[in-house]
Image: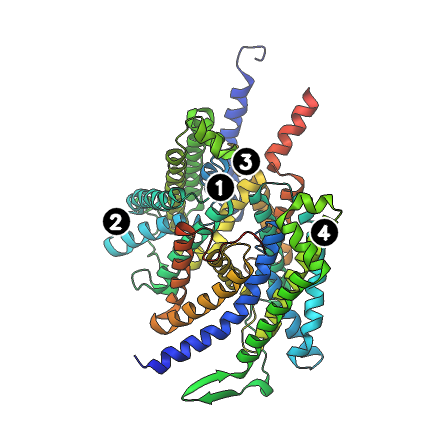
Protein backbone atom coordinates (compact mmCIF):
# COMPACT_ATOMS: atom_id res chain seq x y z
CA UNK A 1 0.00 0.00 0.00
CA UNK A 2 1.10 3.54 -0.80
CA UNK A 3 2.76 4.99 2.30
CA UNK A 4 1.34 8.39 1.37
CA UNK A 5 -2.17 7.06 1.97
CA UNK A 6 -1.13 5.80 5.39
CA UNK A 7 0.55 9.08 6.34
CA UNK A 8 -2.48 10.99 5.06
CA UNK A 9 -4.71 8.74 7.20
CA UNK A 10 -2.57 9.38 10.27
CA UNK A 11 -2.76 13.14 9.70
CA UNK A 12 -6.56 13.13 9.29
CA UNK A 13 -6.85 10.88 12.34
CA UNK A 14 -4.68 13.19 14.40
CA UNK A 15 -6.74 16.24 13.37
CA UNK A 16 -10.01 14.51 14.31
CA UNK A 17 -8.32 13.21 17.45
CA UNK A 18 -7.86 16.82 18.60
CA UNK A 19 -11.63 17.33 18.48
CA UNK A 20 -12.19 14.01 20.26
CA UNK A 21 -9.75 15.23 22.90
CA UNK A 22 -11.93 18.21 23.78
CA UNK A 23 -15.05 15.99 23.92
CA UNK A 24 -13.31 13.37 26.04
CA UNK A 25 -11.51 15.77 28.39
CA UNK A 26 -14.77 17.57 29.17
CA UNK A 27 -16.57 14.24 29.69
CA UNK A 28 -13.76 13.30 32.03
CA UNK A 29 -14.05 16.60 33.93
CA UNK A 30 -17.67 15.71 34.72
CA UNK A 31 -16.71 12.18 35.71
CA UNK A 32 -13.79 13.37 37.81
CA UNK A 33 -15.89 15.78 39.86
CA UNK A 34 -19.31 14.14 40.07
CA UNK A 35 -18.30 10.48 39.43
CA UNK A 36 -21.03 10.48 36.78
CA UNK A 37 -20.69 8.94 33.34
CA UNK A 38 -22.62 11.52 31.36
CA UNK A 39 -24.58 9.86 28.57
CA UNK A 40 -26.03 13.24 27.56
CA UNK A 41 -22.60 14.62 26.63
CA UNK A 42 -23.13 13.80 22.95
CA UNK A 43 -26.59 15.37 23.01
CA UNK A 44 -25.04 18.62 24.28
CA UNK A 45 -22.58 18.50 21.41
CA UNK A 46 -25.47 17.99 19.00
CA UNK A 47 -27.23 21.05 20.49
CA UNK A 48 -24.02 23.06 20.04
CA UNK A 49 -23.90 22.02 16.38
CA UNK A 50 -27.53 22.96 15.71
CA UNK A 51 -27.03 26.22 17.58
CA UNK A 52 -24.13 27.14 15.32
CA UNK A 53 -26.04 25.97 12.25
CA UNK A 54 -29.12 28.08 12.92
CA UNK A 55 -27.22 31.16 14.09
CA UNK A 56 -25.04 31.15 11.01
CA UNK A 57 -28.06 30.59 8.70
CA UNK A 58 -30.38 33.18 10.25
CA UNK A 59 -27.83 35.89 11.00
CA UNK A 60 -25.83 35.02 7.90
CA UNK A 61 -22.56 35.09 9.84
CA UNK A 62 -19.52 32.85 9.84
CA UNK A 63 -20.13 29.72 11.99
CA UNK A 64 -17.02 30.37 14.10
CA UNK A 65 -18.56 33.67 15.27
CA UNK A 66 -21.23 31.68 17.11
CA UNK A 67 -18.60 29.98 19.30
CA UNK A 68 -19.04 32.07 22.44
CA UNK A 69 -22.83 32.22 22.21
CA UNK A 70 -23.11 28.46 21.73
CA UNK A 71 -20.72 27.87 24.64
CA UNK A 72 -22.68 30.25 26.89
CA UNK A 73 -26.00 28.67 25.92
CA UNK A 74 -24.77 25.18 26.69
CA UNK A 75 -23.11 26.36 29.91
CA UNK A 76 -26.52 27.57 31.11
CA UNK A 77 -28.29 24.37 29.99
CA UNK A 78 -25.63 22.19 31.64
CA UNK A 79 -25.64 24.26 34.82
CA UNK A 80 -29.44 24.03 35.12
CA UNK A 81 -29.55 20.29 34.41
CA UNK A 82 -26.99 19.60 37.13
CA UNK A 83 -28.58 22.08 39.54
CA UNK A 84 -32.20 21.03 39.00
CA UNK A 85 -31.94 17.33 38.20
CA UNK A 86 -28.66 15.55 38.84
CA UNK A 87 -27.97 17.24 42.21
CA UNK A 88 -31.08 15.50 43.53
CA UNK A 89 -29.62 12.04 43.10
CA UNK A 90 -25.93 12.53 43.89
CA UNK A 91 -26.19 9.92 46.66
CA UNK A 92 -28.13 7.37 44.56
CA UNK A 93 -26.47 4.21 43.15
CA UNK A 94 -24.17 4.78 40.16
CA UNK A 95 -26.45 3.15 37.62
CA UNK A 96 -29.28 5.55 38.51
CA UNK A 97 -27.07 8.49 37.60
CA UNK A 98 -26.15 6.82 34.32
CA UNK A 99 -29.85 6.26 33.61
CA UNK A 100 -30.75 9.84 34.46
CA UNK A 101 -28.26 11.23 31.96
CA UNK A 102 -29.47 8.64 29.45
CA UNK A 103 -33.03 9.93 29.94
CA UNK A 104 -31.83 13.49 29.36
CA UNK A 105 -30.02 12.37 26.18
CA UNK A 106 -33.13 10.57 24.90
CA UNK A 107 -35.24 13.64 25.57
CA UNK A 108 -32.86 16.11 23.90
CA UNK A 109 -32.12 13.94 20.87
CA UNK A 110 -35.76 13.30 20.14
CA UNK A 111 -36.69 16.90 20.83
CA UNK A 112 -34.18 17.78 18.09
CA UNK A 113 -35.76 15.12 15.89
CA UNK A 114 -39.19 16.62 16.49
CA UNK A 115 -38.08 20.21 15.91
CA UNK A 116 -35.58 19.81 13.10
CA UNK A 117 -36.35 16.44 11.40
CA UNK A 118 -33.85 13.59 10.94
CA UNK A 119 -32.52 15.17 7.70
CA UNK A 120 -28.75 15.45 7.44
CA UNK A 121 -27.73 19.08 7.32
CA UNK A 122 -24.44 20.52 6.16
CA UNK A 123 -23.19 24.09 6.36
CA UNK A 124 -21.64 25.33 3.15
CA UNK A 125 -18.82 27.64 4.14
CA UNK A 126 -17.16 28.83 0.96
CA UNK A 127 -14.38 30.73 2.69
CA UNK A 128 -13.22 27.51 4.34
CA UNK A 129 -13.23 25.17 1.37
CA UNK A 130 -9.46 25.22 0.90
CA UNK A 131 -6.71 22.89 1.93
CA UNK A 132 -2.93 23.02 2.17
CA UNK A 133 -0.97 20.70 -0.03
CA UNK A 134 2.62 19.63 0.61
CA UNK A 135 4.44 16.50 -0.59
CA UNK A 136 1.19 15.07 -2.01
CA UNK A 137 -0.35 15.39 1.49
CA UNK A 138 -3.51 17.38 2.12
CA UNK A 139 -4.32 19.40 5.23
CA UNK A 140 -7.97 20.50 5.09
CA UNK A 141 -8.30 24.03 6.43
CA UNK A 142 -11.48 23.66 8.58
CA UNK A 143 -10.12 20.48 10.14
CA UNK A 144 -6.85 22.19 11.03
CA UNK A 145 -8.72 25.12 12.55
CA UNK A 146 -10.93 22.72 14.54
CA UNK A 147 -7.83 20.85 15.70
CA UNK A 148 -6.07 24.05 16.76
CA UNK A 149 -9.12 25.47 18.51
CA UNK A 150 -9.84 22.21 20.32
CA UNK A 151 -6.25 22.03 21.50
CA UNK A 152 -6.33 25.63 22.69
CA UNK A 153 -9.60 25.03 24.51
CA UNK A 154 -8.22 21.89 26.16
CA UNK A 155 -5.18 23.85 27.33
CA UNK A 156 -7.39 26.67 28.64
CA UNK A 157 -9.47 24.14 30.56
CA UNK A 158 -6.31 22.68 32.05
CA UNK A 159 -5.05 26.13 33.10
CA UNK A 160 -8.48 26.96 34.53
CA UNK A 161 -8.47 23.80 36.63
CA UNK A 162 -4.91 24.23 37.89
CA UNK A 163 -4.49 28.01 38.21
CA UNK A 164 -7.81 29.62 39.20
CA UNK A 165 -9.61 29.48 42.54
CA UNK A 166 -12.81 28.04 41.01
CA UNK A 167 -10.73 25.45 39.20
CA UNK A 168 -8.94 24.54 42.39
CA UNK A 169 -12.26 24.20 44.21
CA UNK A 170 -13.48 21.84 41.48
CA UNK A 171 -10.32 19.75 41.79
CA UNK A 172 -10.57 19.78 45.57
CA UNK A 173 -14.03 18.24 45.35
CA UNK A 174 -12.90 15.62 42.88
CA UNK A 175 -10.12 14.56 45.27
CA UNK A 176 -11.93 14.75 48.60
CA UNK A 177 -15.65 15.40 48.67
CA UNK A 178 -16.05 15.49 52.43
CA UNK A 179 -12.97 17.60 53.02
CA UNK A 180 -14.16 20.13 50.46
CA UNK A 181 -17.54 20.23 52.15
CA UNK A 182 -15.95 20.81 55.56
CA UNK A 183 -13.91 23.82 54.42
CA UNK A 184 -17.11 25.42 53.19
CA UNK A 185 -17.13 24.87 49.43
CA UNK A 186 -20.72 25.07 48.15
CA UNK A 187 -20.91 21.63 46.55
CA UNK A 188 -24.14 22.14 44.65
CA UNK A 189 -22.91 25.28 42.95
CA UNK A 190 -19.48 23.83 42.16
CA UNK A 191 -21.05 20.67 40.73
CA UNK A 192 -23.30 22.79 38.55
CA UNK A 193 -20.42 25.01 37.41
CA UNK A 194 -18.30 21.96 36.56
CA UNK A 195 -21.17 20.39 34.62
CA UNK A 196 -21.78 23.70 32.84
CA UNK A 197 -18.10 24.01 31.87
CA UNK A 198 -18.07 20.44 30.59
CA UNK A 199 -21.16 21.16 28.49
CA UNK A 200 -19.71 24.44 27.18
CA UNK A 201 -16.51 22.65 26.10
CA UNK A 202 -18.38 19.96 24.21
CA UNK A 203 -20.53 22.67 22.59
CA UNK A 204 -17.30 24.33 21.44
CA UNK A 205 -16.23 21.04 19.87
CA UNK A 206 -19.63 20.92 18.14
CA UNK A 207 -19.27 24.47 16.80
CA UNK A 208 -15.76 23.87 15.51
CA UNK A 209 -16.69 20.75 13.49
CA UNK A 210 -19.91 22.18 12.03
CA UNK A 211 -18.15 23.53 8.89
CA UNK A 212 -17.12 20.01 7.82
CA UNK A 213 -19.38 17.55 9.66
CA UNK A 214 -22.99 16.58 8.94
CA UNK A 215 -25.62 17.53 11.56
CA UNK A 216 -28.46 15.22 12.57
CA UNK A 217 -30.24 14.62 15.91
CA UNK A 218 -28.33 11.42 16.62
CA UNK A 219 -24.87 12.74 15.65
CA UNK A 220 -23.91 13.02 19.33
CA UNK A 221 -24.28 9.28 19.91
CA UNK A 222 -21.26 8.57 17.68
CA UNK A 223 -19.17 11.07 19.61
CA UNK A 224 -20.29 10.08 23.09
CA UNK A 225 -19.52 6.41 22.49
CA UNK A 226 -16.13 7.34 21.02
CA UNK A 227 -15.54 9.54 24.07
CA UNK A 228 -16.38 6.62 26.40
CA UNK A 229 -13.81 4.52 24.56
CA UNK A 230 -11.25 7.31 24.96
CA UNK A 231 -11.75 7.97 28.65
CA UNK A 232 -11.70 4.27 29.45
CA UNK A 233 -8.55 3.86 27.36
CA UNK A 234 -6.88 6.86 28.98
CA UNK A 235 -8.20 6.14 32.46
CA UNK A 236 -11.45 7.55 33.86
CA UNK A 237 -10.66 10.83 35.59
CA UNK A 238 -7.21 11.29 34.06
CA UNK A 239 -6.94 14.59 32.15
CA UNK A 240 -3.89 13.79 30.00
CA UNK A 241 -4.99 10.16 29.67
CA UNK A 242 -8.12 11.37 27.90
CA UNK A 243 -6.04 13.74 25.79
CA UNK A 244 -3.59 11.15 24.49
CA UNK A 245 -6.29 8.47 24.35
CA UNK A 246 -8.22 10.76 21.98
CA UNK A 247 -5.26 11.12 19.61
CA UNK A 248 -4.72 7.32 19.64
CA UNK A 249 -8.40 6.64 18.93
CA UNK A 250 -8.50 9.29 16.19
CA UNK A 251 -5.57 7.66 14.42
CA UNK A 252 -6.91 4.11 14.96
CA UNK A 253 -10.26 5.10 13.46
CA UNK A 254 -8.65 6.82 10.49
CA UNK A 255 -6.34 3.87 9.78
CA UNK A 256 -9.34 1.53 10.10
CA UNK A 257 -11.08 3.63 7.47
CA UNK A 258 -8.24 3.09 5.02
CA UNK A 259 -7.45 -0.54 5.80
CA UNK A 260 -10.91 -2.00 6.43
CA UNK A 261 -13.95 -2.05 4.14
CA UNK A 262 -17.07 0.03 4.71
CA UNK A 263 -18.29 0.79 8.20
CA UNK A 264 -15.93 -1.76 9.72
CA UNK A 265 -13.68 1.25 10.40
CA UNK A 266 -15.07 1.43 13.94
CA UNK A 267 -14.32 -2.22 14.72
CA UNK A 268 -10.75 -1.48 15.93
CA UNK A 269 -12.15 1.15 18.31
CA UNK A 270 -14.64 -1.20 19.96
CA UNK A 271 -12.01 -3.91 20.09
CA UNK A 272 -9.61 -1.50 21.84
CA UNK A 273 -12.47 -0.60 24.19
CA UNK A 274 -13.34 -4.16 25.18
CA UNK A 275 -9.70 -5.15 25.55
CA UNK A 276 -8.95 -2.11 27.76
CA UNK A 277 -12.00 -2.76 29.92
CA UNK A 278 -10.95 -6.35 30.39
CA UNK A 279 -7.18 -6.04 30.72
CA UNK A 280 -6.55 -2.54 32.06
CA UNK A 281 -9.80 -1.15 33.48
CA UNK A 282 -7.88 1.76 35.03
CA UNK A 283 -6.69 2.76 31.57
CA UNK A 284 -3.25 3.44 30.19
CA UNK A 285 -2.72 6.53 32.32
CA UNK A 286 -5.10 5.65 35.15
CA UNK A 287 -4.86 8.22 37.93
CA UNK A 288 -7.32 9.27 40.54
CA UNK A 289 -7.44 13.05 40.07
CA UNK A 290 -8.45 15.41 37.27
CA UNK B 1 -61.46 -16.93 51.48
CA UNK B 2 -64.90 -15.88 50.28
CA UNK B 3 -68.13 -17.29 51.70
CA UNK B 4 -68.51 -20.33 49.45
CA UNK B 5 -64.96 -21.48 50.09
CA UNK B 6 -63.35 -20.61 46.74
CA UNK B 7 -60.32 -18.35 47.17
CA UNK B 8 -60.88 -14.89 45.73
CA UNK B 9 -57.49 -14.97 44.12
CA UNK B 10 -58.68 -17.79 41.82
CA UNK B 11 -61.52 -15.59 40.59
CA UNK B 12 -59.00 -12.87 39.90
CA UNK B 13 -56.74 -15.11 37.83
CA UNK B 14 -59.67 -16.75 36.04
CA UNK B 15 -61.04 -13.34 35.11
CA UNK B 16 -57.64 -12.14 33.95
CA UNK B 17 -57.16 -15.21 31.74
CA UNK B 18 -60.68 -14.86 30.32
CA UNK B 19 -60.04 -11.22 29.43
CA UNK B 20 -56.62 -12.04 27.93
CA UNK B 21 -58.15 -14.76 25.74
CA UNK B 22 -61.23 -12.82 24.61
CA UNK B 23 -59.68 -9.37 24.18
CA UNK B 24 -58.03 -9.85 20.76
CA UNK B 25 -61.29 -11.15 19.27
CA UNK B 26 -63.21 -8.09 20.44
CA UNK B 27 -60.76 -5.37 19.41
CA UNK B 28 -59.97 -3.96 15.97
CA UNK B 29 -56.69 -4.98 14.39
CA UNK B 30 -54.83 -1.78 15.34
CA UNK B 31 -55.51 -2.28 19.04
CA UNK B 32 -54.46 -5.92 18.78
CA UNK B 33 -51.16 -4.62 17.40
CA UNK B 34 -50.81 -2.24 20.37
CA UNK B 35 -51.49 -5.16 22.72
CA UNK B 36 -48.91 -7.32 20.94
CA UNK B 37 -46.32 -4.56 21.35
CA UNK B 38 -47.14 -4.24 25.06
CA UNK B 39 -46.73 -7.98 25.58
CA UNK B 40 -43.61 -8.04 23.38
CA UNK B 41 -41.78 -5.30 25.28
CA UNK B 42 -43.10 -6.71 28.54
CA UNK B 43 -41.52 -10.02 27.51
CA UNK B 44 -38.16 -8.44 26.59
CA UNK B 45 -38.19 -6.39 29.79
CA UNK B 46 -38.92 -9.53 31.82
CA UNK B 47 -35.94 -11.23 30.15
CA UNK B 48 -33.65 -8.25 30.86
CA UNK B 49 -34.96 -8.01 34.42
CA UNK B 50 -33.46 -11.38 35.38
CA UNK B 51 -29.93 -10.06 34.83
CA UNK B 52 -30.46 -6.32 35.31
CA UNK B 53 -33.14 -6.31 38.00
CA UNK B 54 -32.47 -9.43 40.05
CA UNK B 55 -28.68 -9.75 39.69
CA UNK B 56 -28.16 -5.98 39.47
CA UNK B 57 -25.92 -6.34 36.39
CA UNK B 58 -26.93 -3.45 34.16
CA UNK B 59 -26.74 -4.50 30.54
CA UNK B 60 -26.86 -1.68 28.00
CA UNK B 61 -26.35 -4.14 25.18
CA UNK B 62 -29.22 -6.62 25.27
CA UNK B 63 -29.73 -5.90 21.57
CA UNK B 64 -26.80 -8.31 21.07
CA UNK B 65 -28.94 -11.26 22.24
CA UNK B 66 -32.04 -9.94 20.51
CA UNK B 67 -30.21 -9.64 17.18
CA UNK B 68 -28.58 -13.07 17.48
CA UNK B 69 -32.04 -14.62 17.90
CA UNK B 70 -33.54 -12.64 15.01
CA UNK B 71 -30.70 -13.40 12.58
CA UNK B 72 -30.33 -17.10 13.53
CA UNK B 73 -33.94 -18.08 12.83
CA UNK B 74 -34.18 -15.79 9.80
CA UNK B 75 -30.98 -17.00 8.12
CA UNK B 76 -31.91 -20.64 8.76
CA UNK B 77 -35.36 -20.02 7.26
CA UNK B 78 -34.17 -18.05 4.22
CA UNK B 79 -31.21 -20.29 3.37
CA UNK B 80 -32.36 -23.78 4.38
CA UNK B 81 -36.14 -23.39 4.76
CA UNK B 82 -35.79 -24.45 8.41
CA UNK B 83 -38.95 -23.61 10.33
CA UNK B 84 -38.41 -20.48 12.44
CA UNK B 85 -39.75 -22.44 15.40
CA UNK B 86 -36.66 -24.63 15.21
CA UNK B 87 -34.52 -21.60 14.37
CA UNK B 88 -35.94 -19.92 17.45
CA UNK B 89 -34.65 -22.70 19.70
CA UNK B 90 -31.20 -22.52 18.12
CA UNK B 91 -31.26 -18.72 18.29
CA UNK B 92 -32.09 -18.97 21.98
CA UNK B 93 -29.22 -21.41 22.55
CA UNK B 94 -26.82 -19.12 20.67
CA UNK B 95 -28.11 -16.18 22.70
CA UNK B 96 -27.42 -18.12 25.90
CA UNK B 97 -23.94 -19.04 24.62
CA UNK B 98 -23.21 -15.41 23.76
CA UNK B 99 -24.35 -14.55 27.29
CA UNK B 100 -21.88 -17.05 28.70
CA UNK B 101 -19.10 -15.62 26.51
CA UNK B 102 -19.77 -11.95 27.38
CA UNK B 103 -20.47 -12.84 30.99
CA UNK B 104 -17.40 -14.98 31.54
CA UNK B 105 -15.17 -12.26 30.04
CA UNK B 106 -16.74 -9.35 31.93
CA UNK B 107 -17.22 -11.13 35.25
CA UNK B 108 -13.83 -12.82 35.14
CA UNK B 109 -12.20 -9.41 34.84
CA UNK B 110 -14.45 -7.98 37.54
CA UNK B 111 -16.37 -5.39 35.49
CA UNK B 112 -19.15 -3.89 37.58
CA UNK B 113 -21.78 -1.18 37.36
CA UNK B 114 -21.19 1.36 34.59
CA UNK B 115 -18.15 -0.55 33.29
CA UNK B 116 -20.24 -3.67 32.69
CA UNK B 117 -22.94 -1.51 31.07
CA UNK B 118 -20.46 0.08 28.65
CA UNK B 119 -18.80 -3.27 27.84
CA UNK B 120 -22.14 -4.86 26.90
CA UNK B 121 -22.93 -1.79 24.79
CA UNK B 122 -19.62 -2.28 22.97
CA UNK B 123 -20.37 -5.96 22.27
CA UNK B 124 -23.76 -5.09 20.75
CA UNK B 125 -22.18 -2.32 18.65
CA UNK B 126 -19.51 -4.74 17.39
CA UNK B 127 -22.23 -7.15 16.27
CA UNK B 128 -24.11 -4.29 14.57
CA UNK B 129 -20.99 -3.26 12.64
CA UNK B 130 -20.24 -6.85 11.65
CA UNK B 131 -23.81 -7.47 10.45
CA UNK B 132 -23.62 -4.20 8.48
CA UNK B 133 -20.66 -5.56 6.55
CA UNK B 134 -21.39 -9.27 6.00
CA UNK B 135 -22.97 -10.44 2.75
CA UNK B 136 -24.53 -13.27 4.75
CA UNK B 137 -26.67 -10.84 6.77
CA UNK B 138 -27.64 -8.71 3.77
CA UNK B 139 -25.55 -5.74 4.98
CA UNK B 140 -27.46 -2.47 5.49
CA UNK B 141 -30.27 -3.72 3.21
CA UNK B 142 -31.31 -6.22 5.86
CA UNK B 143 -33.34 -9.34 5.15
CA UNK B 144 -36.92 -9.61 3.94
CA UNK B 145 -38.54 -12.83 5.14
CA UNK B 146 -40.52 -14.54 2.34
CA UNK B 147 -44.28 -14.46 2.85
CA UNK B 148 -45.90 -17.85 3.40
CA UNK B 149 -49.46 -16.68 4.14
CA UNK B 150 -51.30 -18.66 6.79
CA UNK B 151 -48.48 -20.97 7.78
CA UNK B 152 -48.37 -21.42 11.56
CA UNK B 153 -45.67 -24.08 11.17
CA UNK B 154 -43.50 -21.43 9.51
CA UNK B 155 -44.30 -19.00 12.36
CA UNK B 156 -46.44 -16.86 10.04
CA UNK B 157 -50.07 -15.91 9.92
CA UNK B 158 -52.13 -13.21 8.25
CA UNK B 159 -54.10 -12.65 11.44
CA UNK B 160 -52.51 -10.66 14.25
CA UNK B 161 -54.39 -12.85 16.75
CA UNK B 162 -51.92 -15.68 16.04
CA UNK B 163 -49.00 -13.47 17.08
CA UNK B 164 -50.95 -12.24 20.08
CA UNK B 165 -51.26 -15.73 21.52
CA UNK B 166 -47.64 -16.63 20.71
CA UNK B 167 -46.25 -13.63 22.57
CA UNK B 168 -48.77 -14.08 25.39
CA UNK B 169 -47.53 -17.64 25.94
CA UNK B 170 -43.89 -16.50 25.71
CA UNK B 171 -44.57 -13.83 28.32
CA UNK B 172 -46.28 -16.31 30.64
CA UNK B 173 -43.29 -18.63 30.24
CA UNK B 174 -40.82 -15.83 31.05
CA UNK B 175 -42.92 -14.80 34.06
CA UNK B 176 -42.97 -18.40 35.26
CA UNK B 177 -39.16 -18.52 35.06
CA UNK B 178 -38.96 -15.21 36.92
CA UNK B 179 -41.31 -16.45 39.65
CA UNK B 180 -39.22 -19.58 40.10
CA UNK B 181 -36.13 -17.39 40.48
CA UNK B 182 -37.88 -14.83 42.69
CA UNK B 183 -39.24 -17.38 45.14
CA UNK B 184 -36.22 -19.67 45.18
CA UNK B 185 -32.64 -19.90 46.33
CA UNK B 186 -31.33 -18.39 43.08
CA UNK B 187 -33.32 -15.23 43.71
CA UNK B 188 -31.83 -14.87 47.18
CA UNK B 189 -28.30 -15.29 45.85
CA UNK B 190 -28.88 -12.86 42.99
CA UNK B 191 -30.35 -10.30 45.40
CA UNK B 192 -27.32 -10.73 47.66
CA UNK B 193 -25.05 -10.05 44.68
CA UNK B 194 -27.12 -7.00 43.72
CA UNK B 195 -27.10 -5.49 47.20
CA UNK B 196 -23.45 -6.06 48.03
CA UNK B 197 -21.34 -8.30 45.86
CA UNK B 198 -18.32 -8.39 48.17
CA UNK B 199 -20.41 -9.44 51.16
CA UNK B 200 -22.17 -12.08 49.06
CA UNK B 201 -18.78 -13.45 48.07
CA UNK B 202 -17.64 -13.35 51.69
CA UNK B 203 -20.56 -15.43 52.94
CA UNK B 204 -19.78 -18.06 50.35
CA UNK B 205 -22.03 -17.25 47.38
CA UNK B 206 -20.32 -18.23 44.12
CA UNK B 207 -21.03 -14.82 42.62
CA UNK B 208 -19.31 -15.63 39.31
CA UNK B 209 -21.45 -18.73 38.72
CA UNK B 210 -24.74 -17.04 39.67
CA UNK B 211 -24.08 -13.97 37.54
CA UNK B 212 -23.29 -16.31 34.64
CA UNK B 213 -26.54 -18.18 35.25
CA UNK B 214 -28.38 -14.86 35.18
CA UNK B 215 -26.88 -13.72 31.87
CA UNK B 216 -27.41 -17.20 30.38
CA UNK B 217 -31.15 -17.24 31.13
CA UNK B 218 -31.54 -13.59 30.20
CA UNK B 219 -29.66 -13.98 26.90
CA UNK B 220 -31.62 -17.12 25.99
CA UNK B 221 -35.02 -15.51 26.58
CA UNK B 222 -34.08 -12.25 24.85
CA UNK B 223 -32.93 -14.15 21.74
CA UNK B 224 -36.33 -15.90 21.53
CA UNK B 225 -37.87 -12.42 21.47
CA UNK B 226 -35.64 -11.60 18.48
CA UNK B 227 -37.20 -14.43 16.47
CA UNK B 228 -40.68 -13.24 17.39
CA UNK B 229 -39.83 -9.73 16.16
CA UNK B 230 -38.47 -11.08 12.85
CA UNK B 231 -41.56 -13.21 12.22
CA UNK B 232 -44.01 -10.49 13.21
CA UNK B 233 -42.50 -7.73 11.07
CA UNK B 234 -40.98 -10.10 8.46
CA UNK B 235 -38.03 -7.75 8.02
CA UNK B 236 -34.83 -7.24 9.99
CA UNK B 237 -31.78 -5.01 9.52
CA UNK B 238 -28.71 -4.21 11.65
CA UNK B 239 -30.01 -1.08 13.49
CA UNK B 240 -33.39 -2.55 14.53
CA UNK B 241 -31.76 -5.73 15.79
CA UNK B 242 -28.36 -4.75 17.23
CA UNK B 243 -28.81 -0.96 17.59
CA UNK B 244 -28.40 1.04 20.80
CA UNK B 245 -32.06 2.13 20.49
CA UNK B 246 -33.17 -1.50 20.81
CA UNK B 247 -31.08 -2.00 23.95
CA UNK B 248 -32.66 1.12 25.44
CA UNK B 249 -36.22 0.01 24.57
CA UNK B 250 -35.49 -3.35 26.23
CA UNK B 251 -34.44 -1.95 29.63
CA UNK B 252 -36.71 1.09 29.74
CA UNK B 253 -39.84 -0.78 30.82
CA UNK B 254 -38.42 -2.76 33.75
CA UNK B 255 -36.76 0.41 35.06
CA UNK B 256 -39.96 2.46 34.83
CA UNK B 257 -42.13 -0.40 36.10
CA UNK B 258 -39.84 -1.64 38.85
CA UNK B 259 -36.60 -3.59 38.60
CA UNK B 260 -36.13 -6.85 40.44
CA UNK B 261 -39.86 -7.48 40.79
CA UNK B 262 -41.81 -10.13 38.89
CA UNK B 263 -44.46 -7.81 37.45
CA UNK B 264 -42.49 -4.55 37.21
CA UNK B 265 -41.60 -4.97 33.52
CA UNK B 266 -45.24 -5.65 32.59
CA UNK B 267 -46.40 -2.59 34.49
CA UNK B 268 -43.76 -0.55 32.69
CA UNK B 269 -44.93 -1.93 29.34
CA UNK B 270 -48.60 -1.26 30.19
CA UNK B 271 -47.76 2.38 30.96
CA UNK B 272 -45.23 3.14 28.21
CA UNK B 273 -46.98 1.22 25.39
CA UNK B 274 -50.25 3.20 25.22
CA UNK B 275 -48.38 6.41 26.09
CA UNK B 276 -46.04 5.82 23.15
CA UNK B 277 -49.03 5.32 20.84
CA UNK B 278 -50.73 8.50 22.06
CA UNK B 279 -47.59 10.63 21.71
CA UNK B 280 -46.99 9.21 18.26
CA UNK B 281 -50.54 10.32 17.47
CA UNK B 282 -49.99 13.82 18.84
CA UNK B 283 -46.40 14.51 17.78
CA UNK B 284 -46.70 12.38 14.66
CA UNK B 285 -43.94 12.73 12.13
CA UNK B 286 -40.70 10.93 12.55
CA UNK B 287 -39.96 7.44 13.77
CA UNK B 288 -38.75 7.56 17.36
CA UNK B 289 -40.27 10.88 18.43
CA UNK B 290 -42.14 9.08 21.24
CA UNK B 291 -38.71 8.49 22.82
CA UNK B 292 -38.75 12.16 23.82
CA UNK B 293 -41.59 11.40 26.24
CA UNK B 294 -39.89 8.16 27.32
CA UNK B 295 -36.74 10.16 28.12
CA UNK B 296 -38.72 12.61 30.25
CA UNK B 297 -40.44 9.71 32.04
CA UNK B 298 -37.09 8.03 32.69
CA UNK B 299 -35.78 11.25 34.26
CA UNK B 300 -38.93 11.59 36.39
CA UNK B 301 -38.90 7.97 37.52
CA UNK B 302 -35.20 8.02 38.48
CA UNK B 303 -35.66 11.19 40.54
CA UNK B 304 -39.10 10.64 42.09
CA UNK B 305 -39.77 6.88 41.96
CA UNK B 306 -36.36 5.19 42.21
CA UNK B 307 -38.06 1.84 42.86
CA UNK B 308 -40.27 2.18 39.79
CA UNK B 309 -44.04 2.30 39.60
CA UNK B 310 -44.39 -1.13 41.21
CA UNK B 311 -42.25 -0.16 44.19
CA UNK B 312 -44.18 3.08 44.58
CA UNK B 313 -47.60 1.35 44.39
CA UNK B 314 -46.40 -1.29 46.82
CA UNK B 315 -45.28 1.32 49.35
CA UNK B 316 -48.48 3.31 48.80
CA UNK B 317 -50.76 0.31 49.42
CA UNK B 318 -48.78 -0.86 52.45
CA UNK B 319 -48.91 2.64 53.88
CA UNK B 320 -52.71 2.70 53.58
CA UNK B 321 -53.55 -0.79 54.79
CA UNK B 322 -51.47 -0.64 57.93
Tag 4, which chain? A
Is disc 1 placed on a helix, strand or loop? Answer: helix
B78 left or right, relative to A117: left
Badges 3 and 1: C-beta atoms under 8 Å apart? yes
Determine if residue B4 is in view.
yes
The disc label shown at residue A250, or none = none
Which SS class for mark 4?
A: helix
On the image, the x and y values in percent for residue A276 come to: 41, 54
Compare residues A182 and B291 and report the one nearer the observer: A182
Query: In front: mark 3 or mark 2?
Result: 3
The Cα–Cα distance between marks 4 and 3, rounded to whole angstroms, is 30 Å
Q: Which mark is residue B45?
A: 1
Host chain of mark 1:
B
**Residue A4 x %, y %:** 36, 82
Front label number (1 vs 2): 1
Dot label at residue B264? 3
Q: Choose mark 4 or mark 2, whichever is in front.
A: 4
Residue A264 vertical placement versus B178 (above, below): below
Q: Label 3 lies in what chain?
A: B
Q: Are marks 3 and 2 on the same chain?
A: yes
Residue annotated with mark 2: B82
Tell me the element at label 3.
helix
Give the number of the disc on residue A83: 4
Q: Residues within 10 Å of mark 2 (few under 14, many from 20)?
A: some
Picture quarter containing residue B126? bottom left
Neighbour tally class for label 4: few under 14, some 14-19, many 20 plus, Cα within 10 Å: some
Amino acid sequence: MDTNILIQAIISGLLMGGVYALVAVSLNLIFGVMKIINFAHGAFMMLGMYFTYWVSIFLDIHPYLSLFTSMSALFVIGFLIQYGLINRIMEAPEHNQLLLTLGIALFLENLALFLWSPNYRMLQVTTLAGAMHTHKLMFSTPRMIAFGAALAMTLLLYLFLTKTDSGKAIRAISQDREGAHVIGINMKIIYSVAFGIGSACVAAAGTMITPFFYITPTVGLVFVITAFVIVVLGGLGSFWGAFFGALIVGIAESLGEVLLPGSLKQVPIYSIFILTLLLRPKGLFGKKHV
Amino acid sequence: MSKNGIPKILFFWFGLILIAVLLPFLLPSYFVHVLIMILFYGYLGTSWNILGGYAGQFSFGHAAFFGIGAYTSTLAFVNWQTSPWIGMVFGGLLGGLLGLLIGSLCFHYGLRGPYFALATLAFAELLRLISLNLDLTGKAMGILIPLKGNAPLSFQHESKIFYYFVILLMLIGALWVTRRIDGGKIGDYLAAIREDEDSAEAIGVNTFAYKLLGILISGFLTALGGTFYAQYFLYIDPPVTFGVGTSIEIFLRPIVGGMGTVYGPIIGALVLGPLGEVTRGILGGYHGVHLMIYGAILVGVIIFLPKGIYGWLDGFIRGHTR
